[in-house]
Amino acid sequence: MNEFFTWELLATYTGACLGTGVVTELLKGLFPAAPGRLLGYLTAAALLLLAQLFTGGLTLSGGVLALLNAALVALAAGSGYDLARGLSGKK
């Protein structure tokens, strides 16, 4: 594997969760006053829509589903981060 992320990987649940978690944490550092869950949702929605666009699969119905799936991805990415943080002992 020569690349960390591909658009095909970001179009999967696992890739979207990982990408959302990483980008959201970066953005929370840049915009500390922004609500974390909203930032996570917007990040997930953008990644899923862009992944569909760049893999040639963006349709109206696919875009609407991406917006719904973004809620699942954002919650999963946030929960994964919270779990990792709890295991590390950081509050």
Image (cartoon, rainbow, N blue to C red):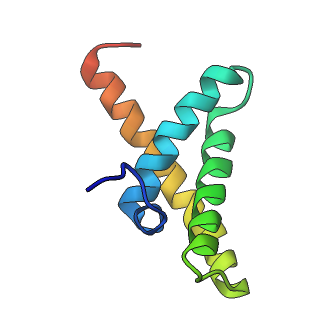
Task: Say above or below: 22 vs 54.
Answer: above
Q: Is residue 36 left or right of residue 12?
A: right
Relative to 5, is 53 above or below? Answer: below
The quadrant in which residue 48 appears is bottom right
Determine the residue located farthest toward the top in the rendered image. Answer: 90
Residue located at (29% from left, 14% from top): 89
- Residue at the farthest front position: 2
The residue at 36%/59% (across/down) is 14
Residue 25 lies left or right of residue 58; in this view the side is: left
Query: Residue drawn 53% across and 31% down?
Result: 25
Estimate the x, y position of residue 57 in percent, counting from the top left.
58, 83
In the rendered image, residue 64, in percent from the top left (x then y), is placed at 69, 77
Q: Is residue 90 above or below residue 44?
A: above
Q: How many marks?
A: 0
Residue 16 placed where, x, y %? 46, 57
Q: Which residue is drawn at the image coordinates 51% and 47% (left, top)?
A: 20
Q: Please identify the quadrant where the N terminus is shown.
A: bottom left
Q: Looking at the rendering, in which quadrant would you find the C terminus?
A: top left
Can you say whether 33 is above or below 10 in the image?
A: above
Could you say where residue 69 lies in the image, as x and y percent from the top left? 55, 67
Which quadrant of the view contains residue 13? bottom left
Asked whether 61 or 55 is in front, the reply is: 55
Q: Residue 36, located in which quarter of the rendered image?
A: top right
